[in-house]
Image: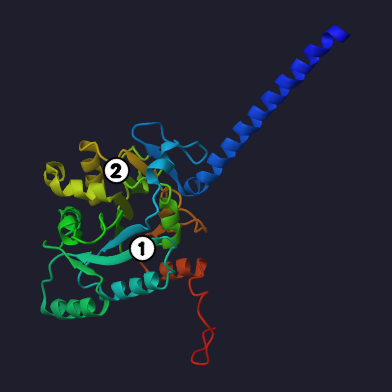
């Protein structure tokens, strides 16, 4: 019995060492899970041509390292619309002007359209600019799928790059339709752990796909990092392909230029309005980043009611809203 005692002690010591190592590995795994909790909540992320990471997949360690910065996130939300859409612009100013500014971020909303063509437009749009200073007028003839998107992105560096101001002027540029509702706090939260270079973010097409490298991001609203904006300005690839569905053409530019190695599929935090049901629709839910196909006021009101956007209304003797 006495001769066996040292072996027993050795077994106990070895068992203790393995137990400690197990605890260290477990703790490390939990830290990684917490680190990417918000990312997994809003969608799936992929780096380069690596296999797509679904909601339940682990994510590369370089993700947080590439995106870490003490600077506030600067986002340009550009809503492409038409000069005569005065009522829609005023409505959207209410929608975005009443959202609280996300902590640690600066989101600027601008309305974008081509050259003015009527006397009414010249007066009314000029008054809007004087009052709100939130309009960008591109040097183009109004169109949807004949180069407006290219004119917009390729014009931004010259418009926005200025000396003695932060560079880049925006970390991300988000092109949006005027029938899409973005919830800014959730948008910013989904971006916090993403890279600020070579990023392409949105709702991947086709609707049934979850692979951000499959085709392209829906025109409801897609976001790119500033370096891609700079590339669009100088590359010959976008210039050679201007016509066609703008979201599809945009995706082809990135594919042919070997850009956007970092891609984020925000499905199903971005989706079409629930009715009529299609492969692109989803029920309204709290983790929403964007709702699309809000072409009618009743859809807007149902969406705004779901998210209880007037809950911050203060009581007053001056009004009574049941």
Give x and y (percent) for residue 207: 39, 45
Image vertical order of residue 21 relative to residue 241, above or below: above
Classify residue 322 as left or right of residue 296: right
Q: Residue at x 50, y 36 (%)?
A: 57
| Location of mark 1 (residue) | 106
Q: Earlier in the sequence, mark 1 or mark 2?
A: 1
Image vertical order of residue 109 relative to residue 225, above or below: below
- What label does residue 198 carry, if any? 2
**Judging from the image, what secondary structure is the residue with disc 1 in?**
strand
Image vertical order of residue 317 relative to residue 243, above or below: below
Give x and y (percent) for residue 310: 49, 75
**Can you see residue 4?**
yes
Give x and y (percent) for residue 100: 44, 69
In the displayed orientation, state which residue is furthest to the bottom: 317
Q: Residue at x 43, y 63 (%)?
A: 102
Give x and y (percent) for residue 272: 40, 55
Q: Between residues 137 and 66, which one lies in front from this camera angle?
A: 66
In the displayed orientation, state which residue is furthest to the right: 1
Image vertical order of residue 39 relative to residue 49, above or below: below
Q: Residue at x 25, y 80 (%)?
A: 131
Please name the colour scheme applied to the rendered image: rainbow
Screen quadrant of the N terminus = top right
Q: Residue at x 18, y 55 (%)?
A: 157
């Amino acid at each position: 019995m006495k001769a066996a005692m040292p072996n027993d002690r050795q077994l106990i010591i070895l068992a203790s060492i393995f137990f400690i190592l197990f605890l260290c590995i477990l703790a490390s795994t939990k830290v990684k899970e917490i680190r990417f909790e918000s990312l997994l909540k809003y969608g799936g992320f992929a780096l380069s041509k690596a296999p797509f990471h679904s909601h339940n997949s682990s994510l590369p360690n370089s993700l947080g390292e590439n995106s870490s910065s003490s600077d506030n996130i600067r986002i340009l939300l550009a809503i492409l619309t038409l000069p005569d859409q005065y009522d829609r612009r005023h409505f959207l100013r209410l929608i975005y002007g009443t959202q609280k500014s996300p902590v640690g971020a600066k989101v600027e909303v601008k309305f974008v359209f081509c050259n003015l063509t009527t006397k009414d437009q010249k007066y009314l749009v000029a008054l809007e600019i004087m009052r709100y200073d939130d309009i960008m007028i591109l040097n183009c003839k109004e169109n949807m799928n004949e180069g407006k998107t290219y004119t917009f992105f390729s014009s931004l560096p010259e418009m926005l790059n200025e000396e003695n101001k932060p560079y880049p002027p925006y970390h991300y540029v988000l092109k949006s339709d005027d029938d899409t509702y973005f919830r800014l706090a959730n948008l910013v939260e989904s971006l916090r752990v993403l890279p600020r270079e070579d990023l392409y973010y949105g709702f991947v097409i086709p609707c049934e796909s979850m692979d951000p490298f499959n085709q392209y991001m829906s025109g409801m609203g897609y976001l790119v990092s500033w370096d891609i904006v700079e590339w669009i300005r100088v590359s010959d690839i976008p210039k050679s392909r201007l016509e066609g569905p703008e979201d599809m053409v945009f995706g082809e530019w990135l594919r042919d230029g070997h850009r956007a190695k970092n891609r984020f599929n925000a499905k199903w935090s971005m989706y079409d309005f629930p009715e009529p049901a299609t492969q692109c629709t989803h029920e309204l839910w709290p983790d929403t980043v964007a709702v699309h196909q809000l072409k009618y006021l009743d859809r807007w009101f149902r969406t705004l009611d779901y998210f209880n956007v007037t809950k911050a209304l203060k009581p007053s003797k001056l009004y009574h809203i049941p």
